[in-house]
Image: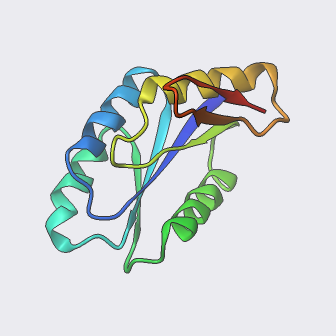
Amino acid sequence: MEKIVIIPALNPDDCLVKIVDRLWEMENQVIVVDDGSDEAYGDLFQSLEEKCTVLHHAENRGKGEAIKTALEYIRTGPWECGAVGLMDADGQHLPEDMEKLLVRTVSSPEALILGIRRMDGASGFFS
């Protein structure tokens, strides 16, 4: 079963490229949704198409709509999806932490699993 990571993006920096590269190395499918970014970001999104699917909104519709667009693409897509993760494009979360969440879904396929951070620096899972 495929592990898919959705990344909504609006005018992203090169951090998005690093995130996609790392997720691809870990054999995850990645869907980036360009949520109406300025034309200056066209080359960045085009460079990502070698390693992931890039969907485009003509204008900014918001993070929630970008997620819905990706989920609809997954629903009608050609693969059997086993797990879906959501990440931001700014590098706030590590691809390695996303991988931990996705792997955990194998033992809990019906669960919603959330990664949490605590103020003491510890992290964990909640399902």
In the rendered picture of this protein, how many numbered marks are placed on residues? 0
Give the percent coordinates (x, y) of residue 74. Answer: 62, 51
Give the percent coordinates (x, y) of residue 10. Answer: 33, 64
What residue is at 72 percent from the left and 26 percent from the top?
105
Give the percent coordinates (x, y) of residue 31. Answer: 47, 48
Q: Which residue lies furthest to the bottom in this view?
A: 59
The colour scheme of the drawn protein is rainbow
Quarter holding the N terminus?
top right
Q: Which residue lies furthest to the front in this view?
A: 120
Q: In which quarter of the image is residue 48?
A: top left
Q: In which quarter of the image is residue 26?
A: top left
Q: Residue furthest right?
A: 110
Quarter holding the C terminus?
top right
What residue is at 50 percent from the left and 65 percent from the top?
63
13 to the left or right of 10: left
Q: In which quarter of the image is residue 118?
A: top right
Q: Nearer the viewer, residue 41 or 73?
A: 41
What residue is at 16 percent from the left and 57 percent from the top?
43
Q: Nearer the viewer, residue 101 or 54?
A: 101
Q: Which of 104 and 55 is in front in this view?
A: 104
Give the percent coordinates (x, y) of residue 97. Answer: 50, 26
What residue is at 82 percent from the left and 35 percent from the top?
111
3 to the left or right of 44: right
